[in-house]
Amino acid sequence: MSAPGALYFEDVEVGKELPVTSREISLEQMAMYAAVCWDFLPVHYDSGTAQKHGFRDAYVDGPMITAFLSELVTAWSGVQGRLRTIAVTYRGMAFPGDKLLCKGKITAKHVDGGSNLAECDIWAENQNGERVVYGTATVSLPTRPD
């Protein structure tokens, strides 16, 4: 019996895009992330400190955007999918008030050591269409039951 809404390896098509997710960044959210991660570098939650260092505002901690991209992939792959790897490169900055669109595209699928793997390109872009983070993710997926 298949799980409702489950994604199976047989359903994956190379070239297909993952459903886009959107995140509006707030200073409060940035402060909460910093607290949870014990990352108390003030430029990630204090606008005055960031401006003293030449930034226009406090800026989002890169791993927070990686978490958004992880969520993109795991929401797409469903409860039976498993995020195996994620690797990203930070190429821009995000600030409070920015709206990030998290996107992805399936680039390959293959079986390796009995695991059904889907490879994806992933990225986050701001409201101006600038990619601030990009990378790759590998997901293992179940086979459709008979």
Image (tube, rainbow, N blue to C red):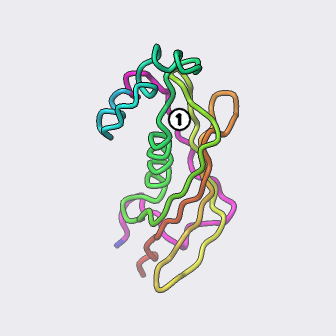
What residue sits 41% from the left and 24% below the top?
45
Q: Give the residue at the far bottom of this rendering.
A: 113
Q: Decide: is 143 above or below 61.
A: below
Whole-percent x and y of residue 86?
50, 59
Name the image quarter holding the N terminus.
bottom left
Q: Nearer the viewer, residue 112 or 57?
A: 57
Q: Most prominent secondary structure in the magenta stretch?
A: loop
What residue sits 52% from the left and 65% below the top?
138
Q: Nearer the viewer, residue 132 or 142?
A: 132
What residue sits 46% from the left and 77% below the top?
143
Whole-percent x and y of residue 132?
62, 38
Name the image quarter holding the C terminus.
bottom left
Disc 1 secondary structure class: strand
Q: Is residue 29 magenta?
A: yes
What residue sits 53% from the left and 35% below the top?
22
Q: Quadrant of residue 98?
A: top right
Q: Give the residue at the far front of this rendering.
A: 53
Q: Label 1, on which residue?
A: 22
Q: Is residue 110 magenta?
A: no
Q: Quadrant of residue 64?
A: top left
Q: Decide: is 78 above or below 111.
A: above
Which residues are drawn in magenta?
2-30
Q: Nearer the viewer, residue 68 or 45?
A: 45
Label 1 environment density (alpha carbons within 10 Å; few <14, some 14–19, many ≥20): some
Whole-percent x and y of residue 114?
46, 85
* Number of marks in picture: 1
Whole-percent x and y of residue 78?
41, 58
Q: Amino acid at mark 1?
A: Ser
